[in-house]
Image: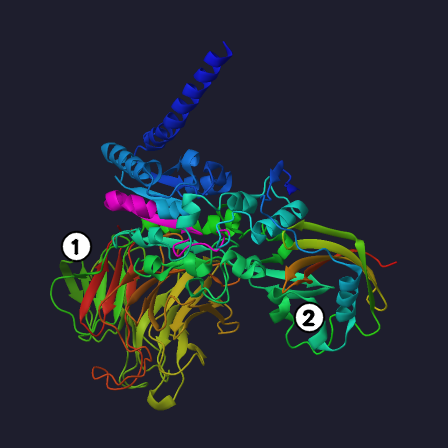
Amino acid sequence: MVVSTGAGWWVLARSHDVRSPPLTEKTAAILADELVSQDPAVARRAYSGAVLSGIEGKESSLLPAGAKVSVDTATFQELGKGIAQVDASVTGSAAGSWRLHLVYEGGRWVIFDTEPLGPGP
Amino acid sequence: MTRRLGASIVVVAMWLAWLTPTQSAMGASACSENPGTDMPVLLVHGFAGDPSIWKDPLKNAITAAGGYVAEPFDYSQTNTRWVDDPTIGEALAIRIRCLADASKASGGPGKVVIVAHSMGGLAAREASREVGDLIALVITIGTPNLGSWLRGNAAGDAVGALGQLLALLCGIEPYEGSCGPLNLIRNAGTPAARAMIPGSPELARLPQFPDSVPVKAIAGDERLTVNLFGTAVALSSPATLLGPDVGLGPDVTLGSPVTGDGVVGVASALDAAQVDSHSLGGSTVDPCEGGILQFASLPCYHSNLPSDPAVVSLIRRTIQAAATTIGPGQPWGEGSFTHPSSLATDADGNVYVVDERGTVEKYSPDGVLVETFGEGITAVTADPEGVIRGFSPGTDPWDDPAKLWTFPPDGSSTYLPVAAGADVLTAESVAVDAEGYWYLAIRGQLGGGSSDSIERLDASGGQPMSASGIGTEVVTGIAAEDIGEGSVIIYVPVPGEVLRFKSDLNNFSLEPIESIPADGAFELPTGVAIAPDSLDPGQLLVSDGNGRVVLLGWDDNLTCAWCEVIGEWGSVEPTSGNEYDDARGYNQPLPHPVAVDPNGNIYLGDYLSNVILKFEQG
């Protein structure tokens, strides 16, 4: 793997490095459904364990009822072993475009951060 | 020809490989300049680093402290080796000895101050095996005394998930043209990185600093958030994202939840074994907050700490305070004292003591009794012109009122009676401002019959202006600081805090009353004195009933910017302050008066042990 750091390029990956599975249409759809679920237990499945403690106690999803998430798997980019990003659009009352920062945990991709990219479509 | 050239290259390469570390060690150990009479300050960089970590603000702050000259110690050629490498610990010891010897030969202090970042603090510990007696002060910044969580994964893979995450973060948020976290990760498989795994035998073998070396440990505390569709969610550390892959897990040595500067946990930087046994203790700089994607650009991120304005300020104050560090308290003054309750010093360094006998005893700075005057005095103060003023309580508000005594240098004495009917019971601490107003700390009556109050009286002894309601039976000290145009700041210590309020010619009121918090530096303050310039950066001295002398400094928000224990004394009072006291016959904090002369020598009256302790400037 080659990464731009602003000061040059460093080769980070090692020969025995094994990539995680890509984000498929099916797994992306599951992730999108979880994100908009109004069942907190289901919604929490979409997030990394590292951030769960911060959203504990929330009685509903971070996205409001009626929101719909569409993950654009064509933008999926694995930045390294276990770290990736993908763009998504949210429609409904929290409309906008977001970059989802993903980490591979428990055999699947989950979100540890999101970055607003702009207004939704 | 080609074969000969190739052989030459191999020979040269071998020669360079052998020579480079040796040259580095020699270069590092040489004294680049004579420090003269200034205190040398050695700046020791950290793992995988170099002296460029030391930016101008820090170097300028050290210079601005006055009397210091800073030099870097450079081991950048071997900066991934462990600190027991001869080019690091031993070379640092040689450099310290060289600078100390040069300083001594020039009439300087003959000691060296160490300011160390990260692993540089461990290098200083290693060097202290040989030259601990030549180290005047150590300030560590994010030093992993218990190890670092940024150490690669258990398999020794230098670039695990953490490296990948950092690559991501660097790509999004590069700072200063480089990416420090990745630089650390790249070297995670090196000897020094392996040695900094928590619980490593290398860490266990490192000596602690000698008890004689004051240590100030500074830790960074990042408060990170992630953004989940517009909702900010707190994250204790970027490393929590990485779990067991970087060996975090339930790592008890680093504490849980893990907080720190992104590389070194607070618990590791402030390791009690390294900090608590030394006088200056540890400080966590104010937390810095930001999103996880900015974690490496936040001011309290590990590599940014030496440039963090809060850290720079703390280092400057620490170095300045080190120059004024007081020695251990020594019994002072000939003769004996009986429950000393009030102390004052004049501009010449003479000391005035009032104890249960009710006279004012004047001592020379070396403790020789010069003269005794007054009677029935319970509180004394001295002005810069050498005029001594004392307060004596009356026995009856009308027939035998309290008196305000004046003792000029010519040996005469006069007094003014407090206005008849004034409800003045007793005062063990008194202050007089430039306008001639008196301020008395009045203890309320036993059993809550009256609350504590501060009384202001004009020089004619007129009707007191009373400001009450501070507490009951807790006030034993008062200090007044003239701030010009007839205005005075009054300081009154009460349990857990020092109260302050402003008084001017036309207004005397506790409102607004403000609190200077203890910040853990004291619990039961009883005596208070305005710190002279020689005790910079302090603004106030407090004697704590728990056996401490504390120097306080605060910022505009009355937050402790400098609240440090600078001396300890023997007679430790119960922390509650409510124990029955045989000497006084009722329950209340005991007065432990404190006074400081213009040179910063501190005098403390130990009420229970009947001694005056003198803490001399070191």
Residue at horizontal 37%, vertical 85%? Answer: B421
Find out whether residue B134 is within the magenta segment: yes
**A38 lies left or right of B193:** right
Locate residue A58: give its quadrant: bottom right
Give how far across and how far down residue B265 sits, in percent. 47, 58
User: Subunit of mark 2?
Assistant: A
Residue at horizontal 72%, vertical 72%? Answer: A43
Q: Which residue is mark 2?
A: A45
Furthest toward the top, the residue is B1
Secondary structure category for the residue under label 2: helix
Depth order, front residue of B491/B607 = B607
Q: Are marks 1 and 2 in contact (CB under 8 Å)?
A: no
**B351 lies left or right of B64:** left
User: Subunit of mark 1?
Assistant: B
Give how far across and how far down residue A67 sits, in percent. 83, 69
Q: Quadrant of the C terminus of chain A?
A: bottom right
Please say if B431 is above or below B27: below
Q: Report the magenta residues as a range.
A: B124-152
Give how far across and how far down residue B504 sits, in percent. 49, 66
Secondary structure category for the residue under label 1: loop
- Label 1 and label 2: CA atoms lie apart by 75 Å
Q: Amino acid at mark 2?
A: Arg
Q: Nearer the viewer, mark 1 or mark 2?
A: 2
Find out whether residue B85 is within the magenta segment: no
Depth order, front residue of B539/B53 = B53
- Indicate which disc residue B580 carries: none
Depth order, front residue of B222/A40 = A40
Please say if B113 is above or below B551: above
Q: Amino acid at mark 1?
A: Asp
Q: Which residue is mark 1?
A: B366
**B196 lies left or right of B428:** right
